Amino acid sequence: MNNTMKLNTKITLNNGVQIPILGLGTWKIGDSKVEEIIPSALNIGYRHIDTAATYQNEVGAGKALLKSGIAREDVFITTKLWNTDHGYDKAIAACDKSLQNLGLSYVDLYLIHWPVADLFIETWAAMEELLASGKCRAIGVSNFTIKHLESLMKQSTIIPAVNQVEFSPYLYQKELLDFCISQGIQLEAYSPLTRGNKLANPKLAEIAERYGKSTAQILIRWSLQTGLVVIPKASSPVHLRENADVFNFEISADDMQILNSFNEDLHICWNPEKEA
Ligand SMILES: NC(=O)c1ccc[n+]([C@@H]2O[C@H](COP(=O)([O-])OP(=O)(O)OC[C@H]3O[C@@H](n4cnc5c(N)ncnc54)[C@H](OP(=O)(O)O)[C@@H]3O)[C@@H](O)[C@H]2O)c1
């Protein structure tokens, strides 16, 4: 689908729900700023917003959505269950709280933010219940390694629809990607721009120059051509527009290989191999 991808292209998840391939990350964008930036994103054509209870901007995100006048079913909203809300009862209550903050009756995707050891299995049982109740259209996980996924799938009924992990050419988690593909779990890339750390890298800049694109656009396009859902964060209209302008070119197979070879296991965020 490379050539035909657009900002409103969707991937069908393992339960039939469709997720837009490019979303807006909102970490570190506070309530009032998010209320400004989400309408700008929606105007540009974004239809997928990634938030989390711990970002403390669900209220602003909900207000922005309401103000936009765009039909609820046309925008894909993800939020996440934070580490202190693990366990069956707490998880049910955490989802209700997020829905209340957002002013919504359901989210499109509810993720376990982090695989808190000894608790995520019990939490997943609550996620399955939340899915059955219609409070979430799809459920998934974040920061899960292959080990976490195997353990979860052995002890539960529903396979996660999504695993949201840090992913970029500098953290090319090929084994995890292949595993998720084999299990029907969609990988979603967070910190796809390496939080800016690699945007001035000369080897990346050289590729960007070949396409007349920015290094940020190359990283986003690489994620999409790798088959990932990608959620770059932007807090200015200039960045929002630039990050959405990645559908009028295609990275060649050779350049994709070069980008894949940039891997240096660079974790800008947290490393679930070490910290879980
Ligand atoms: N599940 C998890 O554990 C987890 C962890 C981390 C992140 N996430 C999600 O993933 C999203 C994205 O990850 P991230 O925020 O860590 O990092 P990121 O998207 O890799 O990078 C964001 C940074 O890049 C800058 N930027 C954006 N567009 C740019 C452009 N075109 N040119 C130059 N700089 C640009 C942003 O600046 P401005 O803000 O100034 O535009 C910001 O400083 C988060 O916002 C969050 O929704 C999830």
Image: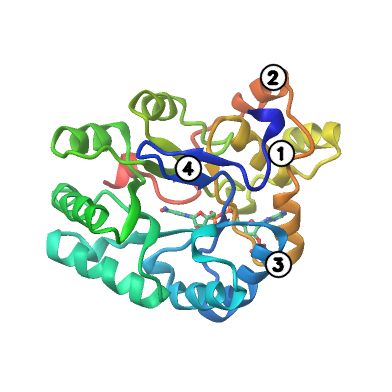
In the picture, the quarter occupied by the N terminus is: top right
- Are the residues tagged 4 and 2 within 8 Å (C-beta)? no
Q: Is mark 3 within 8 Å of ligand 1?
A: yes
Neighbor class of circle 3 (other Cα within 10 Å; few <14, some 14-19, many 20+) is few
**Residue 98 appears left or right of 77:** left
**Residue, disc 4:** 188
For the residues labelled 3 and 4, the Cα–Cα distance comes to: 22 Å
Q: Residue 259's spot in the image, x, y percent?
A: 65, 28
For the residues labelled 3 and 1, the Cα–Cα distance comes to: 19 Å
Name the element at disc 3. loop
Neighbor class of circle 4 (other Cα within 10 Å; few <14, some 14-19, many 20+) is many
Observer-nearest residue: 100 or 18?
Answer: 18
**Residue 253 appears left or right of 121:** right
Q: In this orientation, does residue 213 appear?
A: yes
**Residue, disc 1:** 218
Looking at the image, tell me whether mark 2 or mark 1 is earlier in sequence order: 1
Looking at the image, tell me whether mark 4 or mark 2 is earlier in sequence order: 4
For the residues labelled 3 and 2, the Cα–Cα distance comes to: 32 Å
Residue mark closest to the camera, 1 vs 4: 4
**Residue, disc 2:** 253
Name the element at disc 4. strand
What amino acid type is highlighted by mark number 2? Ala
Name the residue rendered at 61%, 42% in the picture: 9
Q: Residue 255 falls in which quadrant of the image?
A: top right
**Residue, disc 3:** 236
What amino acid type is highlighted by mark number 1? Ile
